[in-house]
Image (cartoon, rainbow, N blue to C red):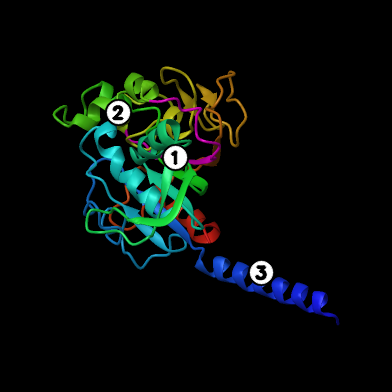
Amino acid sequence: MNRTGRVAVALGLALTAMMAVVAAQATNYSLWINGRGGGGQVGNHADFSYWGPATTAAGVNKKSVNWDGYNRISSTNGGIRDALDCYCTGANWCYVAAHSAGNLQIGYALSLYGTSTRSIKTPSPNAAGQCGNSGAGTQTGWNIKWVDVAGGAGGGSELADAGDWALSEPLVSDLKTSTARALYNHNATAGKTFYMFAGSRGTLYSFVLPGQDDEAIAYHSSGGVSGSSGASFCNPSDWFCNDLTLGTAANQGGRAKWSNHNVKFRDDGEAYNHYTAGNWGGIVSRARADMAANAQ
């Protein structure tokens, strides 16, 4: 082999080694965004007390993106963006899971900031859940593979409309159906797919919720149904309202889902309610199983 050939081989080996180093440094994370009521320590991404045991499988390198679950989305969303900056920039990628009002948090972040310029961070947060710049510059938006949403409140809840929740909570104002649906453009997801998990184990006291519901959220919201207000959607076994369809197709009756919203699970057996019960329970159990199997 002549000198030119040896140089070419050496350069090729060096490039391969460099690419291997970059690949080795790339890490995937699974971010979990809580809903109303909070529970985990804000800024502590290892505190899974909202969800259940931290030892439970819930996706690769799971992190709990805790926020107070009490104040309005606009005033608390900065903490969500901090976590996305920490773990979903540079060579790192994220899977995101959200419950209830956590749907509003990730939807708000992606709609209003999903194509903004973000500084690439080192994934080592301080006590406030913020990470320092890595020195690698900036990028557009976040590296998110997809979003799983369990009992999503992106379309609001009639329980907030009716005053069934404490009206002194600022968040309840955002959870009113008309407010939640106008809070941001739900069709603008920065190209990320929202996989929706809709529970239907409602009870008699949830009669205020139209169609099938999980005791707190009706199908029109947990199914990502578009429009400025809610409507009744049900399982195919219910003859008295239109079906919530699986996938991205329009629902029976013609009402479309928001763009990039895909119903991955519809609770035809009416087995799943809204609540985690301190053990990854309710409709969250279905999203958790999906994250454990596919967020790798």
Q: Residue at x 25, y 59 (%)?
A: 126
Q: Mark 2 and mark 1 in contact? Answer it, CB < 8 Å.
A: no
Which residue bears the numbered disc 2?
Answer: 175
Q: Is residue 199 magenta?
A: yes
Q: CA distance from mark 2 to mark 3?
A: 52 Å
Which residue bears the numbered disc 3?
Answer: 15
Dot 1 amino acid type:
Thr
For the question of whether residue 272 can be seen, the reply is no
Q: Residue at x 54, y 30 (%)?
A: 244
Name the spot of residue 265 as percent of width and height, x first: 53, 43
Name the spot of residue 75 as percent of width and height, x first: 24, 34
Secondary structure at badge 2 equals helix
Secondary structure at badge 1 equals strand
Image depth: mark 2 or mark 3 in front: 3
Dot 3 amino acid type:
Leu
Name the spot of residue 214 as percent of width and height, x first: 38, 38
Q: Which residues are magenta?
A: 184-203
The numbered mark, 2 or 3, whose residue comes first in the sequence reads: 3
Q: Nearer the viewer, residue 114 or 205?
A: 114
Name the spot of residue 14 as percent of width and height, x first: 65, 73
Which residue bears the numbered disc 1?
Answer: 117
